[in-house]
Amino acid sequence: MVSENTSIYQIFLRNFTREGTFEAAIPFLEGIKNMGFEWVYLTPLHPIGRVARKGTLGSPYAIQNYREINPELGTIDDFRRFVKHAHDLGLKVMIDVVYNHTSPDAELAKTHPEWYLRDKKGNFLRKFDDWSDVIDLDFSSSPALWDELVDTLIQWRDEGVDGFRCDVASLVPLEFWKYARSKVNGIQSDGSERYPLLWLAEQVHPGFLFRVREKGYRCHSGPELQQAFDLTYDYDGFERLEAYWAGKKTLDFFVDYLYTQQTSYPEGVTKARFLENHDQRRAAWRFSDLSQLRQWTVFYQLLPGVTFVYMGQEYALSTTPFLFEKSPIDNETKNTDFAGWFGRCFSLTQKIKSNAEHFSIKLLRHGVVWIERRGASQYVALLNLENRRGEVEIPFALKGRECFTEKMVSLSGSVEIPSEPLVVEI
């Protein structure tokens, strides 16, 4: 079971710094630790295929060799220094695992073409035509494929990696993930693990899952993946937020689903909650008004689950780095004032999760949310997600310390909808 206080900071090394290397990223690890994060998650660090490459530099998810380091990022020794520095700071390191597919010119495609989906003429296949820079592995082809992939994970475990984020995990057979975890983590007869590595699954959008199954392929849902994984992406909930942001649904479409998640997943399951990642637009692009961005930041960090942050999110950056090109974070556009607030907010929400594990939520009116967190302490958040104006009736009298301003507040009945996040410790 993963604690809600687990937290993940994602780095896309190519575009994290101007240099785009392990060495250049090392000095930033202390700042990530000081913000309060537990994990650093690295997008794929392996060589990228050249055949059918997208863009100039290619997608890091079109991998040519699972066992090597992309020389554009540095050497294996550079990686080891990165891991050691992270560990010395008390950070854990998670790497991306991309086992649904490889690049067409992958080492495995050369040595073991029989391990891939192929047509009757022996041509490599992929499940989705627009994924044109990859070819798909066939997990029914040979037990030797499973052992090779597991042995690769053990190699990276022995290099000091503490966990794996598994790309489109829904598309890879659940039986493989169970087998891989048992071997890599060294599950003992009593159920304990010799190597307690953490496993994070990129659960796909429900709409995507439905289309995959319609095509005749297996595709696993979040509850299924929890049989092998510690954490799953909140794409089942995020799909509903996307419909709301697009104006197709109201916010209750998402809020009501939180109850479904809490009752349909196994007890104790934790979701990875995010507003952005390398596949999604920046939160600051979506919410260009900083007060609204602050409201949404508090909202998603108080949801039940693990806080997941993409590099630069803390600076309210609105430009999403390109996946196929060099487009490093622009230091000139960093909002350091927002970063200071973000650090205080993250520290607060982590404290709330530690002291108040019980979560409840209700909509007071369109776009105005009331969140309660109860436990050893009690907190209430009144959040204005749609920049509403006017007044709203609150469920009960609220008296206590407002956590951002440190001022005492006493509210009851009909109150003015706040323009900034209101979080009260009762």
Image (cartoon, rainbow, N blue to C red):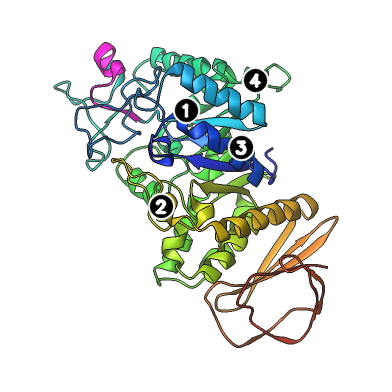
What residue type is disc 1 on? Glu
> Does 45 appear above or below 203?
above
Q: Position of residue 182 (x, y in %)?
A: 59, 20
Tell me: residue 225, above or below residue 240.
Answer: above
Q: Position of residue 402 (x, y in %)?
A: 76, 69
Q: CA distance from mark 4 to mark 3?
A: 26 Å
Q: Secondary structure at mark 1?
A: helix
**Quadrant housing the C terminus:** bottom right
Closer to the camera in the image, 271 or 63: 63
Dot 2: few (<14), some (14–19), or many (≥20) neighbours within 10 Å? few
Element type at mark 2: loop
Q: Is residue 179 visible?
A: no
Q: Residues at badges 2 and 1 in contact (C-beta under 8 Å)?
A: no
What residue is shown with label 4?
Answer: 195
Q: Residue 288, image x and y in percent? A: 44, 68
Residue 362 visible in the displayed image: yes
Q: Secondary structure at mark 4?
A: loop
Q: CA distance from mark 4 to mark 2?
A: 32 Å
Report the Cα–Cα distance between label 1 and label 3: 14 Å
In the figure, is residue 41 to the left or right of 60? right
Contact flag, marks 4 and 1 (Cβ < 8 Å): no
Q: How many marks?
A: 4
Q: Earlier in the sequence, mark 2 or mark 1?
A: 1
Name the residue beneath numbered marker 1: 23
Name the residue beneath numbered marker 2.
280
Quick one: label 3, few (<14), some, or many (20+) residues within 10 Å? some
Residue pointed to by mark 3? 30
Q: Earlier in the sequence, mark 1 or mark 3?
A: 1
- Which residue is depicted at the point 59% across and 58% down? 300
Spatial CA distance of label 4 from label 1 is 27 Å
Dot 4 or dot 1: first in sequence order is 1
